[in-house]
Amino acid sequence: MAQIEFKEALVFTGGGTGGHFFPAVALAEGAKARWSHLPIAFVGAIRGIEGIKLPLSQWPHLLFEVEGFLGRSPLKMTRAAWKLWRAKSNLKAQWKQQRPKAVIGTGGYGAAPALLAARDLGIPYFLHESNAAPGELVRRVSKGARRVWCGMDAVMPLLPGADCLTVGTPIRSSFLREFTTVKDLAAPFQLLVLGGSGGARAINEAMMLAAPPLLEQFPDWTILHQTGAGEFERIKAAPHHERHQIVPFIEAMDEAMEAASLVVSRAGASTCAELKAAGRGAILIPLPNSAHDHQKKNAEALGLENRAVLVSQQANLADHIEAHAASHMANAYARIKLGKTPELNRAVELCLNDLAKALGREF
């Protein structure tokens, strides 16, 4: 197992999916910009998105072979518990020699070893919960956290006994800028389709059916479609319209979102926060089996702000996507009304201000 310099470091942990990992990256970027002398390290899971992204980054990191617990068979849960115990023990051994200054967790099973090790050793730890309903890990360790930063007020009553502060959802530094508004975009217009970092088969298959009639009906539109790496080979081989561009993953998501006049997406908290920062309206299709149905609650929150149209995943999903997309592709006023003005995101600033205050000083 690799050895990382943890002494007096800020340790960021969170992953499995982009919705957990990217807020951790956003907080780490902000911390590095604010306290350039301070060591920063990441802890995560080999199998999560962090297992792909961290080895390609400049962040010092430690990845463990750990798994999630929810929805597993008793045998697989036992195996997951053993892997978690082993990873936590490894971290505790290292941190007894090199004690971090604090651990900041953004949820997901990949954050469990670091957060549980910090709790056992009395290392200050902080949590961020982006979703309207807390994840199981955050729920279990929230009472011992110095602070739980919440993406929205709705999660606070679901964490009794925790010291909560609503800050919004941290987004990557590339989104902390001015965006061209939807009303200032010109043809050819773009429909951006996102299924999350891991891909979404239901959305992918529905878009393959909905795209041809949409692009035939609207010749001044194109579609940029992120399938997820696992789905890309299967989807790209299928017949598709020449103005339907299919890619496995979009690195410059801020640029893709700025170029889009309308978005079709899952309803992860990070995506919802990025949509607000970019001022883009969306047709949101929540993951139906998300923990505690948090994606539906995220989508409903944007719907209440008239920033999104909520579409449930269903057998005739392609028809619903086509109908809602067509109504906005045909009507510039509807797109502008849904997109609204880009909203300044201060979540990273608010979290880091609170972190400095809680630990007693600027570092």
Image (spheres, grey):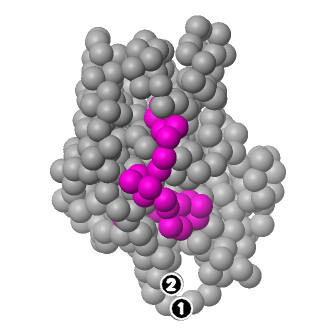
Please indicate, yes or no, whether residue 72 appears anywhere in the rendered image: no
Q: Is residue 255 magenta?
A: no
* Viewer-side residue, 42 vs 333: 333
Does 324 sit above or below residue 50?
A: above
Kind of residue indicated by mark 2: Ala
Residue 294: x and y in percent read 30, 42
Q: Which mark is residue 346?
A: none
Q: Is residue 182 magenta?
A: yes
Does 260 sit above or below residue 124?
A: above
Q: Would residue 166 appear left or right of 259 to someone viewing this image? A: left
Does 174 sit above or below residue 1?
A: below
- What's the magenta region? 168-195
Q: Quadrant of residue 225?
A: top right
Q: Are marks 1 and 2 in contact (CB under 8 Å)?
A: yes
* Viewer-side residue, 9 vs 221: 221
Q: Which mark is residue 356?
A: 2
Residue 90: x and y in percent read 68, 51
Q: Would residue 132 appear left or right of 117 to someone viewing this image? A: left
Q: Where is mark 1, residue-wise?
A: 361
Q: Secondary structure at mark 2?
A: helix
Mark 1 or 2 closer to N-term? 2
Residue, x 27% and y 47% (percent of image)?
333
